[in-house]
């Protein structure tokens, strides 16, 4: 197929280019009537570009990258990403991307300028490599949709951007709980039944924080010792209906069955009996909740809000971890206890979420296969489990070496390594 040809027809100019043949016959698109050759060339190139884009006219956009990012957040991210992911993207966009390169036209940004932006960012800030990867996700995703979905730009300049080598030592913010610390926390809050039971649930299952506080009693099969993890809670700015929502697990593989041992089964069974007594004690003052669907302009359900019932109804959401009067405060329930854990117990760096990594490390060190640990945590890839949740500690490494040593040191080896130098002998 040839490019655009321009020819003179009498006093005017005409462009022509060949298109796909039909039934073996060569076909052309042409148009005449242009006063100058330059006008014919320009019109022909536009028409040819439209043709090779399946009839969709290509117009170079004059939109700034800043304005396009707003468009991308509202039209793509809000329909495809989870709320917390969108909030994280907004922070990255507003704090780092817009101030640096937001003023430029979307169509003028190149691979070179984007790589320069990333290198400058790495040199200016001391973020973890994972946070820089999140910034890359925003860049790559926004340009991918601009090119492939919206057709605003001809090519995607973010395809080749990479993180430079980062020599900074990344701080390990994960805390591996010792048994002594867990016992100390349990003793400190032994009269706070809801916190203790939520703490033990994460401690003995490795569930994510949002998964723990999304649990309903229908999710827990105490008779068979199984927890069905199906949801996660998240919060948004508060309005008159509250701020807590219940959504899907972080990933599809996050939906899973977790078998629970005797300790957690006893704790949950006794806690359930306590909640039933509290319902009787508070009577009509006990608080119940239900799910209210939030729909978009097209009538599609986009979120499920946890809403306080005005009257006790049939569609109650039987949330597990609520205050004594039934009040649901989501993950806020652990905020004050952890303030005391940091300030009074002196366990400075720990978080509720770190119970997940501690569980994974201890289960693996007890001999569980890494793939089974990944399944327990709801990870699709074992690499995620290995890289972010399994932590090797000095005692474990020393014990591993000592165990290997004891099993592989034979009497022959012992007899050889016990070199004795007698008096008067030279070495």
Image (cartoon, grey):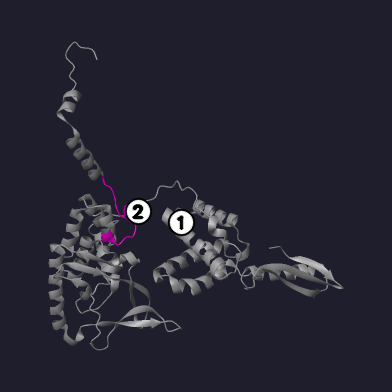
Secondary structure at badge 1 equals helix
Instruction: Say which of 203 and 145 sits in front.
Output: 145
Residue located 43% across and 66% down the image: 88
**Residue 220, located in which quarter of the rendered image?**
bottom left
Give the position of the N terminus as an image quadrant: bottom right
Give the position of the C terminus as an image quadrant: top left
Image-based side of 64 in relation to 44, left or right: left
Residue located 40% across and 70% down the image: 82
Of mark 1 and mark 2, the one earlier in the sequence is: 1
Q: Dots 1 and 2: beta carbons under 8 Å? A: no
- Do we see residue 254 in this rendering? yes
Instruction: Say which of 332 and 57 sits in front.
Output: 57
Residue 7 is situated, as x and y percent measured from the top left of the image, at: 81, 67
Secondary structure at badge 2 equals helix
Q: Is residue 400 magenta?
A: no
Q: Which residue is mark 1?
A: 132
Badge count: 2
Residue 297 is situated, as x and y percent measured from the top left of the image, at: 46, 83
Residue 383's tag is 2
In the image, residue 316 sits, relative to residue 134, either above or below, namely below
- Pick out the residue farthest to the top: 424
Disc 1 to disc 2, C-alpha distance: 19 Å
Classify 10 Å Cα crowding around label 2: few (below 14), some (14-19), many (20 and above).
Answer: few
Residue 233 is situated, as x and y percent measured from the top left of the image, at: 31, 72
Residue 247 is situated, as x and y percent measured from the top left of the image, at: 34, 73
**Residue 246, located in which quarter of the rendered image?**
bottom left
- Do we see residue 346 in this rendering? no
Residues shaded magenta: 375-393
Image-based side of 425 in relation to 84, left or right: left
Residue located 23% across and 59% down the image: 344
């Amino acid at each position: 197929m040839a490019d655009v040809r321009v020819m003179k027809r009498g006093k005017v100019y005409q462009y022509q280019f060949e298109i796909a043949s039909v039934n073996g016959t060569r076909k052309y698109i042409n148009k005449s009537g242009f006063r100058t050759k330059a006008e014919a060339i320009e019109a022909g190139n536009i028409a040819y570009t439209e043709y090779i884009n399946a009839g969709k006219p290509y117009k170079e956009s004059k939109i700034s990258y800043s304005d396009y990012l707003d468009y991308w957040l509202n039209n793509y991210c809000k329909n495809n990403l989870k709320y917390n992911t969108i909030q994280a993207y907004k922070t990255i966009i507003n704090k780092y991307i817009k101030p640096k390169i937001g003023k430029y036209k979307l169509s003028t940004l190149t691979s070179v300028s984007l790589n320069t932006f990333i290198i400058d960012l790495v040199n200016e800030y001391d973020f973890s490599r994972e946070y820089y990867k999140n910034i890359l996700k925003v860049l790559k995703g926004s340009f991918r949709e601009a090119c492939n979905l919206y057709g605003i730009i001809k090519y995607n300049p973010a395809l080749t951007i990479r993180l430079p080598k980062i020599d900074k030592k990344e701080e390990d913010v994960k805390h591996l709980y010792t048994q002594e610390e867990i016992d100390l926390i349990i003793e400190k809050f032994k009269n706070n039944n809801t916190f203790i039971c939520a703490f033990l649930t994460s401690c003995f299952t490795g569930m994510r924080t949002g998964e723990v506080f999304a649990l309903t009693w229908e999710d827990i099969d105490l008779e068979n010792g199984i927890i069905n993890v199906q949801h996660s809670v998240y919060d948004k700015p508060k309005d008159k209906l509250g701020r807590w929502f219940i959504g899907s697990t972080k990933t599809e593989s996050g939906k899973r069955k977790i078998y629970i041992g005797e300790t957690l089964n006893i704790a949950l069974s006794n806690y359930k009996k306590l909640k039933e007594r509290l319902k009787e004690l508070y009577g009509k003052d006990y608080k119940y909740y239900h799910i209210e669907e939030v729909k978009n302009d097209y009538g599609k359900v986009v979120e499920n809000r946890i809403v306080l019932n005005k009257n006790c109804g049939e569609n109650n959401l039987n949330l597990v971890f609520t205050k004594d009067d039934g009040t649901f405060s989501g993950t806020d329930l652990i905020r004050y206890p952890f303030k005391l854990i940091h300030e009074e117990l002196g366990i400075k760096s720990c978080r509720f979420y770190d119970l997940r990594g501690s569980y994974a490390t201890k289960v693996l060190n007890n001999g569980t296969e890494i793939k089974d640990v990944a399944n327990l945590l709801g990870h699709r890839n074992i690499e995620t489990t290995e890289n972010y949740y399994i932590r090797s500690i000095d005692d474990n490494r020393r014990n591993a070496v000592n165990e290997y040593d004891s099993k592989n040191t034979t009497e022959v080896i012992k007899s050889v390594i016990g070199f004795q130098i007698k008096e008067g002998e030279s070495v």
